[in-house]
Image: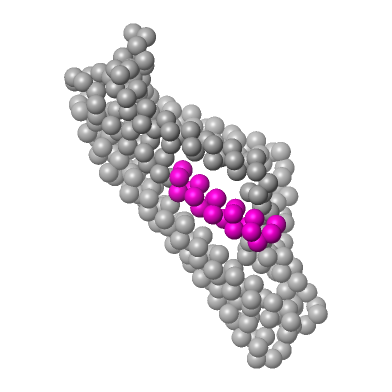
Amino acid sequence: MTNRAEKIRTIYAIILSVFIGAVGIALVCVAADIYYSGEGPGLIYSREIVGDRLKKLAIPLICLLAAIIAGAIFPAFETKAKRTSEATLQKLKRRMPAGGSGEEFERARKAYYNETVLKIFAWCLALVLALICAIVSLVYLSKTAHFREGDLSRQILNMVKTVLPCTAVSVLAFVGASVVNGVCSQEQVKQLKIMIKCGSREIALPAEIEILDRVKKVASHDITLWAVRGVVFVIAVALIIAGVLNGGARDVLVKAINICTECIGIG
């Protein structure tokens, strides 16, 4: 791909990402506006209210759809995925020397393993934060006192105030760990190249590569795939049952009836 096409593709990707984010935020705002525009204690909606709110998003949605189609059609937007630092690192690990001598080799080896420790620490910290946030959210959601009969809007708002910050912290923790992982991988690639250059010709396959190969073989097996599907299915069924017992199904049904029968006008 030429430099000009690469610049066009980069600019297109940035503009499309910003546009999608803006349309998403606008859609959330319109949905909230529709929700709070209901009349009466049952929040009765009308087709006029919904049509008037959604009409404002017609042009942005059409432009977004056109931009996506343009990106799939025009050759100038074609691109080839670049090799990431992590992929380069995994490839170089298979050439890691068994040993070496000299101050440069020892300095590179020490720096390489320091970066490995930093990556492990970053991911462990992200996992701990995500676990804490999950526990806080589950404790709140498991208490039926928070979802007793009453103002449904207030219950939802209180739930969002508790669960949303926990979700945001978890996401940011993993994003931060991913950034740290990428930066450390770039530094490890540099140090590993020095080790290969200054080390012996004998290759020492790291244990993590052997483990990774075994994991790939196990993950590619049909039994593993069906086991994962089974676990996900059991979790989904358990959450559905918990929601029904908690009264959430009735709240969703009432809200769906209000929207469908009163907004669309089939009732």
Identity of the residue furthest to the bottom in this view: 103
The residue lying furthest to the front in this view is: 4
Quick check: 121 above or below 138? below
Image quadrant containing the N terminus: bottom right
Q: Residue furthest top?
A: 267
Judging from the image, the colouring scheme is: one colour
Does residue 13 lie above or below 47 as drawn?
below
Q: Does the stretch in magenta take in 100?
A: no
Q: Is residue 7 magenta?
A: yes
The residue lying at 65 percent from left, 36 percent from top is 226
Q: Position of residue 218 (x, y in %)?
A: 70, 48
* The C terminus lies in quadrant: top left
Name the one closer to the observer, 230 or 175.
Answer: 175
Range drawn in magenta: 1-20
Labels in figure, total: 0
- Residue 147: tell me if it is visible: no
Please report the residue visible at 50 percent of the width from the left and 66 percent of the height from the top. Answer: 180
| Residue sitting at x 70%, y 69% | 93
Residue drawn where x is 64% and y is 55% of the image: 5
Say if 44 sits above or below 14 in the image. Answer: above
**Nearest to the observer: residue 179 or residue 163:** 179
In the image, 160: left or right of 101? Answer: left
The spot of residue 63 in percent (x, y) is: 48, 37
In the rendered image, residue 200, in percent from the top left (x then y), is placed at: 78, 82
| Left or right position of 229 against 146 | right
- For residue 122, side relative to residue 219 (left or right): left
Secondary structure that dominates the magenta span: helix
Q: From where the camera sits, is residue 149 visible?
A: yes
Please state which of residues 231 and 85 is positioned toward the viewer in this rendering: 85
- Could you tell me residue 176's position as x and y percent? 45, 61
